Amino acid sequence: MVLKGGSIARLSGALLITIVAVVQWAVVLERSWAAIWGWYKFYGYGGGQITVGTNTQILFYILSTFFVCVGLKLSRLQAQDDRSGRAVQKLCYTGALLLVIGMLFWTIILISPLAVFR
């Protein structure tokens, strides 16, 4: 299989989207675990939340939305370009889907009593 310049760029984009999704999930799971542990450890003492910055959360959602859009666009371009790149198309789409699910999961944590905004 010989890759053309556009195919290499799309494969790189697919890998970038996947790496961003994995990093996002690592951060979301770590912060969720910290919130649940803090709630368990300090339940009844008036504490136990994690403190999150408002600007950080805005940046999180802006960047996540950007990478979701890039992943979906790359997935659509790969589908229109050729049929041999189905794996790259699925990688882009799966990465974008994982980003959306991560955003929804993090939103649930933020609106729960486990998080406090500063």
Image (cartoon, rainbow, N blue to C red):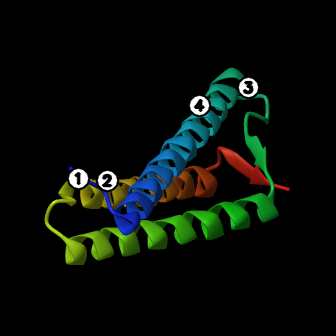
Q: Earlier in the sequence, mark 2 or mark 4?
A: 4
Q: Residue at x 70, y 29 (%)?
A: 38
Q: Earlier in the sequence, mark 3 or mark 1?
A: 3
Q: In the orientation shown, which residue stands out farthest toward the top?
A: 41
Q: For marks 2 and 4, give the one nearer the viewer.
A: 2
Q: Tag 4, which secondary structure?
A: helix
Q: For marks 3 and 1, give the one nearer the viewer.
A: 1
Q: CA distance from mark 4 to mark 3?
A: 14 Å
Indicate the amino acid at tag 2: Leu
Q: Residue at x 38, y 70 (%)?
A: 74
Indicate the amino acid at tag 4: Trp
Q: Tag 1, which secondary structure?
A: helix
Q: In the orientation shown, which residue stands out farthest toward the right?
A: 118
Check residue 42 in the rendering and tell me which mark sits there, or answer none. Answer: 3
Indicate the amino acid at tag 3: Phe
When asked about the image quadrant of residue 26, the answer is top right
When asked about the image quadrant of residue 8, the answer is bottom left
Please name whichever residue, 53 or 110, is drawn nearer the observer in this view of the structure: 53
Check residue 87 in the rendering and tell me which mark sits there, or answer none. Answer: 1
Q: Residue at x 79, y 36 (%)?
A: 46
Q: For marks 3 and 2, give the one nearer the viewer.
A: 2
Q: Are marks 4 and 1 in contact (CB under 8 Å)?
A: no
| Residue 6 in picture, x, y percent from top left | 38, 68
Check residue 33 in the rendering and tell me which mark sits there, or answer none. Answer: 4
